[in-house]
Image (spheres, coloured by chain):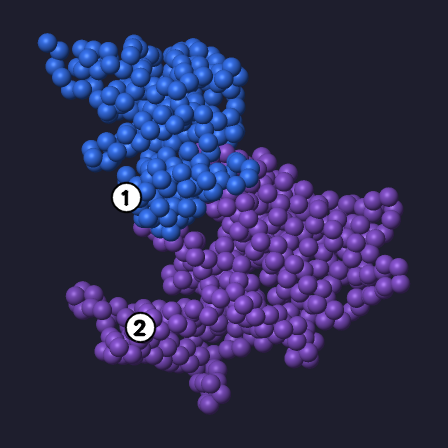
Chain colours: A blue, B purple
Amino acid sequence: MLKVENAVVRYGAITALHGISFEVNQGEIVTLLGANGAGKSTTLRMLSGLHAPSEGQITFDGRDITRVKAHDFSALGISHVPEGRRIFPQMTVEENLDMGAFGRKGSYHDDLERMYSIFPILKERRKQMGGNLSGGEQQMLAIGRALMAQPKLLLLDEPSMGLAPMIVETIFRIIGEIRDSGTTVLVVEQNAAQALRLADRGYVMENGVIAFTDDAQNLLHDPRVRAVYLGESVE
Amino acid sequence: MKDMLRTPLARRIGMTTAVAVLLLIMTGPSGTVYQPTAGVVGSFSARSSFFGLFATQRWVVWLALTLIVTGVIRAVKFLRARVPQVNTVPREAVAAIKAPFRRRSIRFSSYGVVLLVALFIPALISDNFWQQSIVEAIAVYVLLALGLNVVVGFAGLLDLGFVAFYAIGAYVTAWVTGALPLHAPFGVHLDPFWAIPIAIAVAMVAGILLGIPTLRLRGDYLAIVTLGFGEIVTIFLNNLYKVTGGSTGSNQVPHFVFHVGPLKYAWGLGPVPYYYLTLGFVVLFLLAFSRLEHSRVGRAWTAIREDEVAAESLGINPLKFKVMAFAIGAASAGFAGVMTAAQTNFLSPQTFLLSVSINVLVLVIFGGMGSIIGVLVGAALVQFLLTYLDHYAPYGFQPADIYIYLGALLVATMIFRPAGLIPAKRRRREIAMAEAGEGHMDELLTGDTP
C-alpha cells in the first residue's frame, strides 16, 4: 500500500535519512522504532509532505507521491496525527473534529457519531475547549480528528508521548480497533514494548538507516531490541 | 533616603508627577529649530485657563488635573476593597441582563437601531465640517479597519502596508476616470461609480500578487515585507510623475454619477450623499465579512491561526487561504480608495503614507482583533475623537501630536483590554493563552518542529 524506496532526506548539509526503504501493506499495523535522533520523526515528516526527500521514491496505492504537498495528503487518504498532538486549543472538541472533515464533501455526521462511540469521553467533553483537555483526551481527539478524513492509512507520531501507562494502554487498544475496522496504521514509537505487542511488523532505525526488520513477535524477543529498547542487558 | 524612595507612596507620587509632566509637555507649545527648549519652557510657564474658572500657569492646571484623576482612581479602588458586595454583582444577574442579547431577534433589532441612528446622523448634524468628516475621516476608516480586520483578526497576518491597497483603489479610480497623466484605458473616461468594481478588482489582484510570494513568511518577516510594499507603492506614486502626476497627484477626479437608462443620480459637492453610499457599502461589507467568519473559509483561517502545521495536515492549504484573506481585505480598502478619490476630487501620495497603515492597525487592535462589531465601534469612536481633537484643539492640543495620542491609546489598550474594546470570544482566549506562554499562537518560528 505504502512503499518507500531509497529515500534520502537532507536538512541543508546534514543528511538525516541515508536511503531508507520500507513498506506498509493493507490492513497491517507497522511500527517504526528507534532512539532519539534515529530519524523516525524525519521519516514521518517525509511521509506527510512536510519535507520532500531529495532522492528516492514514495508510492501509495501504486501512485508516486514523492512530491505531493502536505495539504494534499489527506485527500490521498493518508492522515497524520502529528507529534505533540497539535489540536486546536481554542476550538471545542466538536469543532476540532469538524476540522478533520475539512476536505470532505457532503455530510459527515455519521462519522462524528462514530468518533463519539470510539471515544466516549470526547462526547462528554464536546463543548469544551481542546486546550482544556488532559493529555490523553487530547491524544484521542487528535486521532479522532485524523480519522474524520476517512483515511486509508493513519500515521501516528509518538502517540504515547507524555501519557500515563494506563492511558497508553487504552490508546493502543483503540489503535488496534481502528485497524480492525479497516484502516492501515503506521506508528512511530519510543515505547517499543507497547508498540511491538500491538504491531504486525516492525522496523528498527539507527542513525538514519533501517538497521533491521522482522515480525513484531520476533523483534519483541530479539536480544538487540531487548538490549536497546526494552532496557535489558545482553546475556 | 533610598528606603524612603521605595515606599509605595513615594512611587505613586513619582508616577503621578511624571504623568503630569508628560501630559504638560505633550500638550504644550512647540519649540523651534533655533530655540529647541522653548517648547518645554513654554509648556511650564505659559498661562492657561483652569476649566474656564481662572487663569493660571499651565503646570498648575495639569498637575491638578492629574492629581484629581489619580485621587478618583484611588478612591474607587479603596471603596471597592472596603465594600466588596457593592461591586460583586451575582453571576446570575449578569447572565440575566446578557441573556436577551443572545437571542437572535433582539440582537438583530439592536443592529437595526444602530443602523437607524447611522441613517439619521447627517440630519442630526448640520455642521458642514462634521458632515464632511463622517465620510472622510470616519466612514472611510471604518471600511479600512473592517478590511484589515479580515487580514489581522481572522487570518492572523500582520500587515503593515495596508495603505497600499487603499492607494491602489484611489489611483485606479483616477486612472479610469481620466484624471491621471496616464491615459484612461481605451480612452474611455468612466464615471467613478463604475470605477468601484474595477478598483475593487485591481486591489484584490494586487493582494493576490503580493500575497503569493510573501505569505510563506510568518510573523515579523511578513510584517516587514508588507511594510516595504506600502512604502514602495507610495514612492512609485511620488516618482512616476508621468503616470501618477507625481507629488501633486491629481485634482481632476469627477464626482459619482449613476446613470442607467432612465435612472440618473449625480453626487455633487455635498458630503451627505457620499455618506449614504459609503454607509451602504459598510453594511454590505459587514454582512459579507460576518458571513465569511462562520463559513468554511473562516474556519480554515481560525485553524491556520491556531496551528498552521495541524491545519496543513488536515488538508487545508495555508497559502491559499492566507492569499484569500489578503485579497478580501484589499477589496474593502480598494473601495475606500474610490470613495476618498471621488468625494474629495483630489488625490496625492501624501494621503497614502505609512501613518495610515499604522492608524488603521491601531483601530483594529483597539476595537478587538477578529471582532467585527468591536472594530466597527472602535474605529468610529477613535476616528471621531481624533477628528475632534484635530479640529477644535482643546486644552492646547497640537494636531501634529495626534500619533502620540494614538500610541498612548495603543499602550493603554494592550495593558487594560488586550483583546480590544469588544473582544472576539475566541481571540480573547487565544491572547490569554499567548500571554501565559501556552499554545502555538504568535510563534515566530517557521512553525516546523524538526
Residue B165 in sight in this render: yes
Label annotation for residue A134: 1
Residue A33 lies, in percent from the top left, at 29, 19
Q: Camera-side residue: B52 or B168?
A: B168
Q: Quadrant of residue B249?
A: bottom right
Q: Quadrant of residue B194?
A: bottom right
Relative to residue B414, is residue B385 drawn left or right? Answer: right
Answer above or below: position of B409 versus B213. below
Dot 1 and dot 2 residues touching (CB under 8 Å) = no
Q: Residues within 10 Å of mark 1 (few under 14, many from 20)?
A: few
Relative to residue B411, is residue A30 drawn left or right? Answer: left
Residue placed at 47% from the left, 79% from the top?
Answer: B46
Residue placed at 66% from the left, 65% from the top?
Answer: B279
Q: Quadrant of residue B324?
A: top right
Residue B353 in sight in this render: no
Residue B437 lies, in percent from the top left, at 32, 47
Answer above or below: position of A195 versus B154. above
Answer above or below: position of B147 versus A12. below
Q: Which residue is mark 2?
A: B90
Residue B18 lies, in percent from the top left, at 35, 69
Quadrant including the N terminus of chain B? bottom left
Spatial CA distance of label 1 from label 2 is 31 Å
Q: Camera-side residue: B101 or B281?
A: B101
Residue placed at 54% from the left, 51% from the top?
Answer: B293
